[in-house]
Image (spheres, helix red, strand yellow):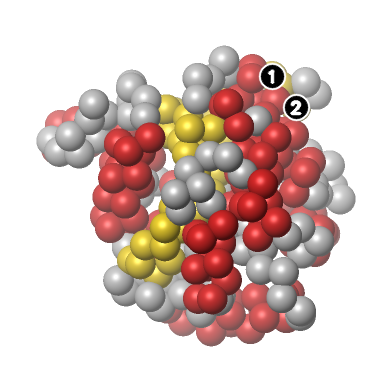
Amino acid sequence: MPDGRVETSQLGACAAEWTKERWITVERWRVRYREAGTGPTIVLLHGLAVSADYWWRNGPALAAAGYRVLAPDLPGFGRTNGPPAGLSIPEQATALDAWAQRMHLEPAVYVGHSLSCQTVLQHAVWQPRRVAGLVLAAPTGDPARHRLLRQAIGLLRDAPRESWRLKVVVAQAYLRAGFRRAWNTWVAAARNDALALATDARSPGVVLLGTRDPVVGRDFAAALAASLPGGELRWIEGGSHAGIYDTAREFNGEVVRFTRSVL
């Protein structure tokens, strides 16, 4: 099993491998994905309107720690074509499962960020034998009233806490995705109850939340963790909503810690 130690040469090699675009035909879509490393599998699933490119501070580091790390672009985002109207959470989970089958993946740890936490949860409920564990980072899916308004206010509060480089990457991704597709996907996700999904899940999981994240309610994060089999809530000190980027070292360490316990 990986011991988590990373040599500079390993990280450099994995970073070079991660920059290569890979493609696979999954039903009607040509899906782009990134891959690096060998060993037990970790799948990274991007949040709303962004892509596999969002994981550039995570994929290479996790691969260098001794894992095979994959990150697909969901249909309609990144460089994978998709319906202009966007996909609901069940539709995203169906696309994720089709890609995983086409890739012939063994049971893996699935890591979601923000909205994609709902997608990997749905995938775990439908395909428990294929999901060895779940890492839910800054998860959305709170069934509380006015959830979209709360998320919007939280995102406005979060914006000043993110780096300019990340803002540029996110802006470019949203322009590529298009307003209609991003909006429809966001609204459709609001019809999905992450707590109900977590109650039905059979895969162990961990919720990761930054101490400076204004988007995700702390009570919701705690309830979500408590609903997962063996679930726990782990705090990332100083992390904002995009803790996978601004506190990447701490985030990666938590992913490695959890993955060791289930794979």
Circle on res. 25: 1
Name the residue: 58% across, 26% down. 129
The amino acid sitting under disc 1 is Thr
Instruction: Report if residue 18 is visible in the image.
Output: no
Q: Is mark 1 on a helix, strand or loop?
A: strand
Labels 2 and 1 touching (C-beta < 8 A) = yes
- Residue 85: image location, x then y, percent: 86, 50
| Total numbered labels placed on residues in the image | 2
Name the residue: 68% across, 51% down. 197
Instruction: Report if residue 261 is visible in the image.
Output: yes
Which image quadrant is residue 76 in? top right
- Residue 202: image location, x then y, percent: 58, 40
Judged left or right of residue 103, residue 204 is: left
| Residue where numbered disc 2 is placed | 29
Q: Quadrant of the N terminus?
A: top left
Using a 10 Å C-alpha cutoff, classify the residue at mark 1 as few (fewer than 14 neighbours), some (14 to 19) or many (20 or more): few
Circle on res. 171: none
Q: Nearer the viewer, residue 46 or 195?
A: 195
